[in-house]
Image (cartoon, rainbow, N blue to C red):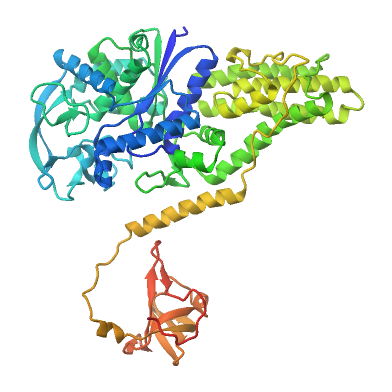
């Protein structure tokens, strides 16, 4: 039975950095497609999101930048909100958890459960940094992940394997504040006893929601089968929602207790009738999240709602896997990402290209890879060559033969009827995939309508019939224009900006979803506007520029993370002035027998021709360095190496990839020139 209304939430992004394509592909693009589809069907929808502004990542960012946590969240909340708006993510409200409404709502929710005796208070030992005089919550502590061996796992999560952790699970823990070994110190916290909800969760998820995506269902089953433990809902921090009970100074609500309540507080901001979305069983609630948030949205938050007792539970939690970038995991700390706000600046008026690519390559069942080559190919070979090409041909031919007036359709041929029948199946195919959160397949079925249009024009060839059978051309172009009008409906959830542009060209308003397949959307005699290109070709130079930018980031990271030797003891200027470094040219080179590393090199120093033995055979082939100008220390005392007298030292440096490079002049200079 169709629900009365829908409550759609998208995971609250942390306001400690911008949004990148991994966030978009995992959460926000599929959520927006689903919401736009529901609205086209005339459904009542509340689309809720906002910035998650509490928790340790915020305080760490503030410490790194030398500003306050409020400064951090103000900066990134504004950046994220504006980027979402420009990208066409159609939230009904984009709120924030630092708001007065949220603090009030989260405090009341905690107090409600506290008064009902739903928490247990426990005193336990927690890691403490004596140098910083602070308890180490979540990301203030790092160590080795006990599950995958990642040496940089956090106290709440391992970002390499995605496992949710407790700080005490870490091997070899250390404080991120001082780098020192933490000690254990006693502290008191409130815990939600998840073990008490385990039988209910087993029934609710494992028996009643077998239709959930396999990655979601499987992770939930693993957690439940492993046995649930009480989970702390407070932290020793000075940033967040204060715990609203006596004797709780210096304690705030745990961010993963606080953050999902942000969906509720944002709905309260949106409408005074918020309870119909949260407490009416005729409302269907769907959480769109990434796979790293599954446990919080499927186990912890539902247990909180169950404990409170008056809220509905999510009907589905469609979580996507991760999106990688050019073969490597997206990393905020390493700047290895395509940032939304930068994309919008670099690709103005091309929002739909990114929406299309992220949907066509969505990580729905496994981690997928975003590449700029694929971005270019999907635009040029699909959006431009399929959708854009069909639309342009249909509209241009209408202007050419009928001055932009929709012609009357005559009697349909058998082939025309086949095309009409195929059009009639599109809505059901796209709808079935959208209802089951298969957005990649839904987009493919929607694009098949454009492919159908291209095939129809290619096979009927109206440009060849114009002189001999203009009546037939009228029918062909009428039907082509009806397909184009249908595309403005079926493509709207996926390509909203392009659809607005196409509707302008057709001089029409929007149609509702149920009219997909209708061949009378454009009446005969309707005047369409002058067409323009829906999409433009992306040139190789544009892709090369993006790839070069990423290559620079990769090299910068290698340099930043490379091991740099400590400075040697100081020398006097007189010591330095004794060194005689000249420019010379390599005349010959050969490997030293029975060694792996040594080359025997003859160098023209400008003073003489001499032999130097250098340990660079693993980095260079002898033939590739002949003719190379190098820097050589010529007054180094001769030394016998493998029965060869080496007279001098060729100066080298290690690049970002760990490979040796010659220290050479940028242009050819005279042999014997001194380096000073």
Question: Is 206 drawn above or below residue 531 in the view shown?
Answer: above
Quadrant in which residue 294 is drawn:
top left
Q: Residue 164: x percent and y percent?
A: 27, 34
> Camera-side residue: 146 or 11?
11
Q: In the image, 204: left or right of 516?
A: left
> Is residue 451 something one can see in this rendering?
yes
Q: Residue 244: x percent and y percent?
A: 15, 21
Question: Is 521 drawn above or below residue 640 in the view shown?
Answer: above
Residue at image location 21% in from the left, 20% down from the top: 107
Q: In the image, 627: left or right of 647?
A: right
Residue at image location 15% in from the left, 19% down from the top: 119
> Camera-side residue: 621 or 461?
461
Residue at image location 71% in from the left, 13% down from the top: 520
Q: In the image, 121: left or right of 161?
A: left
Which image quadrant: the C terminus? bottom left
> Camera-side residue: 649 or 298?
649
Question: Is 186 drawn above or below residue 262 in the view shown?
Answer: below
Q: In the image, 198: left or right of 125?
A: right
> Camera-side residue: 624 or 305?
305
Question: Is 185 drawn above or below residue 560 in the view shown?
Answer: above
Q: Residue 436: x percent and y percent?
A: 48, 20
């Amino acid at each position: 039975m169709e629900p009365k209304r829908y409550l759609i939430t998208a995971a609250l992004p942390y306001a400690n950095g911008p949004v990148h394509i991994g966030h978009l592909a995992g959460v926000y693009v599929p959520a927006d497609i689903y919401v736009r589809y529901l609205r086209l069907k005339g459904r009542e929808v509340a689309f809720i999101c906002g910035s998650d502004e509490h928790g340790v990542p915020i305080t760490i960012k503030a410490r790194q930048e030398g500003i306050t946590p409020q400064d951090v969240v103000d900066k990134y909340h504004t950046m994220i909100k504006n980027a979402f708006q420009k990208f066409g993510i159609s939230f009904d409200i984009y709120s924030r958890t630092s708001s007065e409404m949220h603090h009030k709502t989260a405090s009341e929710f905690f107090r409600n459960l506290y008064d009902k005796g739903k928490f247990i208070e426990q005193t336990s030992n927690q890691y403490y940094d004596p140098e910083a005089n602070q308890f180490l919550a979540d990301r203030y502590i790092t160590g080795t992940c006990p599950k995958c061996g990642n040496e940089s796992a956090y106290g709440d999560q391992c970002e390499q394997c995605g496992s949710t952790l407790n700080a005490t699970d870490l091997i070899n823990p250390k404080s991120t504040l001082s780098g020192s070994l933490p000690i254990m110190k006693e502290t008191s916290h409130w815990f939600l006893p998840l073990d008490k909800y385990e039988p209910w969760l087993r029934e609710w998820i494992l028996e009643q929601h077998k239709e959930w995506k396999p990655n979601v269902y499987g992770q939930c089953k693993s957690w439940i089968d492993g046995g649930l433990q009480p989970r702390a809902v407070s932290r020793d921090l000075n940033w967040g929602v204060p715990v609203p009970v006596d004797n709780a100074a210096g304690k705030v609500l745990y961010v993963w207790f606080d953050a999902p309540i942000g969906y509720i507080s944002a709905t309260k901001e949106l409408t005074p009738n918020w309870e119909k979305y949260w407490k009416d069983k005729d409302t269907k609630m769907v959480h769109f999240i990434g796979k790293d948030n599954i446990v919080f949205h499927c186990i912890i938050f539902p247990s909180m709602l169950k404990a409170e007792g008056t809220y509905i539970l999510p009907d589905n939690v469609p979580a996507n896997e991760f999106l990688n970038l050019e073969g490597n995991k997206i990393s905020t700390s390493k700047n290895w990402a395509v940032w939304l706000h930068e994309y919008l600046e670099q690709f103005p008026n091309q929002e739909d290209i990114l929406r299309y690519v992220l949907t066509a390559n969505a990580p729905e069942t496994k981690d997928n890879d975003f590449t700029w080559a694929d971005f270019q190919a999907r635009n040029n070979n699909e959006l431009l060559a399929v959708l854009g090409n069909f639309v342009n041909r249909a509209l241009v031919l209408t202007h050419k033969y009928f001055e932009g007036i929709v012609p009357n359709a005559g009697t349909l041929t058998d082939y025309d009827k086949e095309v009409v029948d195929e059009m009639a199946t599109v809505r059901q195919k796209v709808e079935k995939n959208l209802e089951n959160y298969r957005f990649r397949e839904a987009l493919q079925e929607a694009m098949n309508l454009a492919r159908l249009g291209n095939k129809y024009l290619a096979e009927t060839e109206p440009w060849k019939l114009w002189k001999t059978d203009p009546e037939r051309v009228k029918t062909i172009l009428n039907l082509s224009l009806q397909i184009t009008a249908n595309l403005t409906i079926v493509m709207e959830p996926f390509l909203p900006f392009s659809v607005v542009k196409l509707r302008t060209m057709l001089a029409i308003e929007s149609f509702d979803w149920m009219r997909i397949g209708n061949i009378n959307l454009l009446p005969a005699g309707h005047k369409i506007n002058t067409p323009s290109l829906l999409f433009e070709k992306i040139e190789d130079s544009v892709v090369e520029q993006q790839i070069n930018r990423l290559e620079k980031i990769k090299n910068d990271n290698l340099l930043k993370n490379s091991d740099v030797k400590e400075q040697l003891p100081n020398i006097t200027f007189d010591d330095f002035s004794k060194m005689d470094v000249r420019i010379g040219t390599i005349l010959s080179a050969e490997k030293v027998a029975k060694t792996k590393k040594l080359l025997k090199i003859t160098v023209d120093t400008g003073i003489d021709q001499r032999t130097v033995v250098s340990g660079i055979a693993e980095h260079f082939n002898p033939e590739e360095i002949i003719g190379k100008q190098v820097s050589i220390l010529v007054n180094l005392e001769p030394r016998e190496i493998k029965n060869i007298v080496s007279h001098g030292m060729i100066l080298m440096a290690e690049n970002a990839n760990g490979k040796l490079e010659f220290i050479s002049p940028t242009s050819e200079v005279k042999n014997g020139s001194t380096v000073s």
